[in-house]
Image (cartoon, rainbow, N blue to C red):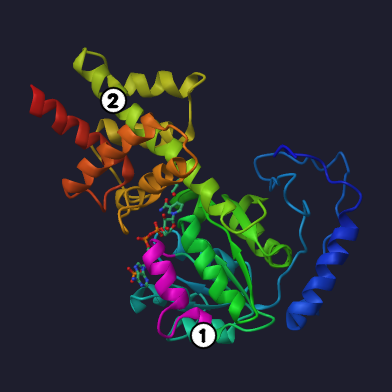
Amino acid sequence: MPSTLLAKPNINNLLSSTAMALCSAFCPRISANFRPKPFSSSPSKPLLSLSFKVFSSQATDASSQDKFSGRVGFLGLGIMGSPMAQNLIKAGCDVIVWNRTKSKCDPLISLGAKYSSSPEEVAANCDVTFAMLADPESAIDVACGKNGAVSGMGPGKGYVDISTVDVATSKLINEHIKARGALFLEAPVSGSKKPAEDGQLIFLTAGDRSLYELVSPLLDILGKSRFYLGEVGNGAAMKLVVNMIMGSMMASFSEGILLSKKVGLDPSVLVEVVSQGAISAPMYSLKGPSMVKSQYPTAFPLKHQQKKLMLTQDLRLALGLAESVSQSTPIAAAANELYKVAKSYGLSDEDFSAVIEALKAKSQDTA
Ligand SMILES: NC(=O)C1=CN([C@@H]2O[C@H](COP(=O)(O)OP(=O)(O)OC[C@H]3O[C@@H](n4cnc5c(N)ncnc54)[C@H](OP(=O)(O)O)[C@@H]3O)[C@@H](O)[C@H]2O)C=CC1
Ligand SMILES: O=CCCC(=O)O
């Protein structure tokens, strides 16, 4: 089925009942309060508007119940995890947090979150545990390592990994969670720091559908849309493809900014021209003005676009994904080289738009 936005079919209530039955089986504590919000096709409530949550036809229910009354764990409070956990707390959820660097928990504790001293303890004390970690290595360690979340999982619990990881990593974590009789959902996000703060992320989910149904009210607090993509690995793959496109777009935009300047144009005007045309993208309008000033306030750290774990990650991992199906991706491969150069210049903690510095340096090399 194409992933277009559709009005809800009337079988929604039936699906919601199915979800309730599944939840009753797996999560008795939560399902006691699981009340699906009936879908309304009233024309006075448009499906698409800026303030309205948008759902894919691949989602199982376009609306979700108002409230999730189970206890929610949150592991990983970095640029993305902190605002996400904060939004859950502000929405009235009962949240337990953990982060490797404990001080990052403090602002959330002062907002009402509880704290547990290990991922295992969080998972043991929560119905559903979310993880938003840097890379595959940390995602595996926090889930499957010593005192990891897996040790605290069991029947009736769910683990939702929002980190950007590769397909193999997601499948590995899924296997460990499943071995404990719990449910697993991968749910990487499209959208950066600001969408995380504004509850406007896009979830790319795959895995246990009953868990997807169950946590939909939470995803709807954190995001503007959610896609259910089927088998574990599909969410990770979708995220890598999106980031591959984004990485190439940013590298190309950087070339344009520098070329415009070299030929005597005002790059700020280029940013404006781009923003009004067919190739306009929020990313260009948001980051272009800073890039022109050689400023890269970190939203998506460059190190995550060029993560390193056993010679793979984000762009690099997307290239691996392409390789595995013999898909040619020369543009992304060239972009990847630039991110590697930028990383070697010590720009890992800058925003990924700092990739433009790699091009500046290259121009000087050849001048
Ligand atoms: N920033 C963005 O725009 C977006 C990021 N993403 C993805 O989301 C994930 C998180 O990104 P972001 O929040 O920006 O990253 P940050 O670098 O800000 O945060 C990373 C988090 O992972 C934790 N962490 C890192 N290594 C370990 C480890 N070995 N053991 C335990 N915890 C660890 C950090 O803990 P500590 O605080 O102790 O360092 C921190 O909580 C990444 O996978 C990223 O690719 C997805 C969409 C957008
Ligand atoms: O993984 C990071 C993606 C950032 C974005 O979607 O803006």
Q: Secondary structure at mark 1?
A: helix
Q: Which mark is residue 218?
A: none
Q: Amino acid at mark 2?
A: Glu
User: Is 142 one of the magenta-colored residues?
Assistant: yes
Q: Quadrant of the N terminus?
A: top right
Q: Which residue is mark 1?
A: 151
CB of mark 2 near ligand 2 (< 8 Å): no
CB of mark 1 near ligand 1 (< 8 Å): no
Q: Earlier in the sequence, mark 2 or mark 1?
A: 1
> Which range of residues does the magenta coloring cover?
133-151
The nearer-to-camera label among 2 and 1 is 1
Quadrant for residue 356, please give it.
top left
User: Is residue 33 visible in this depiction of the protein?
Assistant: no
Q: Which residue is mark 2?
A: 255
Q: Position of residue 91 (x, y in %)?
A: 63, 67
Q: How many marks?
A: 2
Tell which of 280 and 111 is nearer to you.
280
The residue positioned 89% from the left and 58% from the top of the image is: 13
Q: Position of residue 288 (x, y in %)?
A: 35, 32
Q: Secondary structure at mark 2?
A: helix
The answer to whether 347 is drawn above or below residue 108 in the figure is above
